[in-house]
Amino acid sequence: MERLEVFDCSNVLIASYFTDDRGCAHENREHTLIYLCSGELEIEERGKKTILHSGDCAFMRRDNRMWLQKKVKDGMPYHSVVLKFSRAFLKEFYRTLDCRQLLSDTKREKVSLRVLPSNRPDIRSLFESVIPYFEAGEKPSEEVLKLKMIEGVYVLLNTDRRFYASLFDFVEPWKIDILDYLNENYMLDLSMEEIASYTGRSLATFKRDFAKVSDLTPQKWIVKRRLEAAHELIKSGKRKVSEICFDVEFKNLSHFSKVYKEVYGVAPSR
């Protein structure tokens, strides 16, 4: 008999249990660790596929879209546990660090998915210790959830020093490169306030920093980048113009046709 269970603990710990294969688009709003108890997980991002097996753990960087294919494997159900790190928690944790621990010379990784080394006892201990809560259908206390986030942060910091810059990317030395971020995420429907926050800046600082790297406003830069993506898709001839319009996050076909013609001199249908 088919089973589908998702147990969400305050959007910090989430367990999934499926007895049949299923796929879904996934957009990370928080830095996330995912641990596979059983089954198989295929992750596709930017054309690259990564497969996790039982006992594997991976870090998913905030603000990235991925396609997840969750599979039953060798008769075992798909069972995963996810640990999310809220921005508020990471800011609080950052304030507890000894300044001598801070490694401002490290660079923030550009990869959005990082598979951690296998057979780590600290990783197994972290995730297997919460499984009894899910089996009993009882949510851990807020204090326990915070302890698990702390444990998860140390799993990452003890793995690679570059995780300092990834986790605490709201700190001045680790401001995210604006154009790198926008080139990766220009398709997302984000406000300027959200983009500023995700790149580790206030809105005023974001606008000031953006003016240093482009003569366009952020809104016009995003429209230009979406039009460039649409132009490449139209030239390929593989998609309908109406599909491309919505694929590149234009909400209105007539508006898309108008601005496309202003830039390229012809209507997209030509």
Image (cartoon, rainbow, N blue to C red):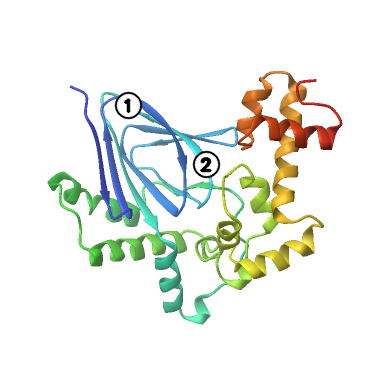
Q: Looking at this rendering, what residue extends furthest in the left direction?
A: 136
Spatial CA span between label 1 and label 2: 25 Å
Task: Identify the residue shown where x is 57% and y is 50%.
Answer: 190
Q: Earlier in the sequence, mark 1 or mark 2?
A: 2
Q: Looking at this rendering, what residue extends furthest in the front direction?
A: 254
Q: Nearer the viewer, mark 1 or mark 2?
A: 2
Tell which of 40 and 186 is nearer to you.
186
- The reply to whether residue 72 is visible in this rendering is yes
- Classify mark 2: helix, strand or loop: strand
- Classify mark 1: helix, strand or loop: loop
Residue 148: x %, y % from top left: 30, 61
Tell which of 94 and 219 is nearer to you.
219
The amino acid type, in three-letter code, at marker 1 is Lys
Q: Looking at this rendering, what residue extends furthest in the bottom direction?
A: 99
The amino acid type, in three-letter code, at marker 2 is Arg
User: Residue 155 appears in which quarter of the rendering?
Assistant: bottom left
Q: Examine the rendered structure and indicate whether residue 113 appears above or below residue 245.
A: below
- The reply to whether residue 105 is visible in this rendering is no
From the viewer's perspective, tell me whether residue 211 is left or right of residue 50: right
Tell which of 65 and 77 is nearer to you.
65
* Residue 65: assigned label: 2
Task: Check disc 1 and report the residue beneath it.
Answer: 73
Task: Identify the residue shown where x is 76% and y is 26%.
Answer: 268
